[in-house]
Amino acid sequence: MTTNDTYVIRAELLSFDADPGEGDTPAEGSVRHIEDAALWIEGGRIRAIDDYARLEPDLPPRIEVIDHRGKLLMPGFIDSHVHYVQLEIMASYGRQLLDWLNDYTFPEECRFAQYDYALALSNVFLDEMLRVGTTTAQVFCSSHPDSVDAFFTASSKRDLRMLAGKVLMNRHAPETLCDDIQGGIRDTERLISDWHGTRRLGYSLTPRFAPTSTRAQLDATGGLLRNDPSLWLQTHLSENTGELDWVAELFPESRDYLEVYEQSGLVGPRSTFAHGIHLDQGMRRRLADRGANLAFCPSSNLFLGSGLFDRHAARDVGLNVTYASDIGGGTDLSGLATLKAAYQVGQLRGQPLTAWQGLYGLTLGNARALSLDSEIGRLAPGMEADFVVLDLDATPLLSRRHARCRTLSERLFALMMMGDDRSVLETWASGRRQHVRD
């Protein structure tokens, strides 16, 4: 390749400019589809996009053209909720949430006190994310500051856009995982100073969930968020009925689980609450009014038996819904697998998920909900050059299904149902090709 980070990718192109809606036909103006497109990359950003025949006369004479005709270009996938420190306990025998945490999660996370181990697992995790076409994620580290330093170091070397944070928890966990209020805030402030806004990295304040933090720790976290509104926040909410009972017992002064977080100032436009299965419509409306989002984690919810997420109820009140793998409770890092599981949950609720809505959610929808849509989530001039090259004939069976498809909608739905890491031919981030399928 040339040495000035300037390339043209020639392929079919699909990107979203707006929410396509719930209909079988996407809303007018929401989809950009070019059958023979030229994507011009320069200096890590997109310089231009057009039909290849129109753009070709304007290209520099010796620019390298990478010919991927027959393949599909899309924005890089975004995962709004994932635990990199749980990568190695994926597919541990399915228990209910609280048992699963004690039996598998907490013992594994103790290992991340060692920087070398955390760095090695960070690199493995990022390799796997790029393999499935995910270029951005909001990531839980462990309660050890070294786990955050290691993850951001690995992400920075690859120039990835990532959000992450140190877990804050000062009770109801092994002593080696618990921090104290002052120490946890001090560590968090140092990590923010070192990493937040560095290259393409952002810091997410990360109280694990209400039961593992005292009110004082939640209040201190809310103080950090009020002092710097450029920070993100991630935690869990209403995943499991046993969890709800526990929260009610621990916080009797709060009328419901959400109010625990509201009272500490943790609900805002950059707040992600994972799961949100067991909510009433009033709670959903309160989240929507503050601009927060719920991370829909369908494979995790099915695996742990937590319940069926009500996507339409969230949309009815204008509440942002993002899509997430929730590894290691989830069963697959692939965004396509997440959408497949989301479709299955939707079918059980009478809420079928179209490929238009699913792929929008995995790209621009997630970017908007995470306040990242000025940089990523769609393919357009000036945006960061994070994208995937998808092979709709990646497997013999997928190829046979593809041959029978009559419309773009059918092709995309088949990809959503049957695609996996083999469907990702290449993953590009910051204008660099960072994964090539074996």
Image (spheres, helix red, strand yellow):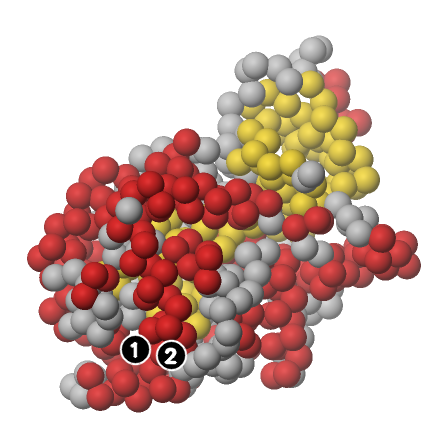
**Visible in this render: residue 230?**
no
Foreground residue, 96 or 343?
Answer: 96
From what the image shows, is residue 181 above or below residue 2?
A: below
Which quadrant would residue 85 be assigned to in this image? bottom left
On the image, the x and y values in percent for residue 195 come to: 28, 39
Q: Mark 2 points at which residue?
A: 99
Residue 209: image quadrant is bottom left
* Inter-mark Cα distance, 1 to 2: 23 Å
Mark 2: which amino acid? Asp
**Residue 301, disc:** none
Q: What element carries label 1?
A: helix
Of marks 1 and 2, the one in the foreground: 2
With 395 as the anchor, is 428 left or right in this view? left
The residue drawn where x is 49% and y is 55% is: 79
The label shown at residue 258 is: 1
Q: Position of residue 214 (x, y in %)?
A: 16, 72
- SS type, badge 2: helix
Within-10-Å neighbours for mark 2: few <14, some 14–19, many 20+? few
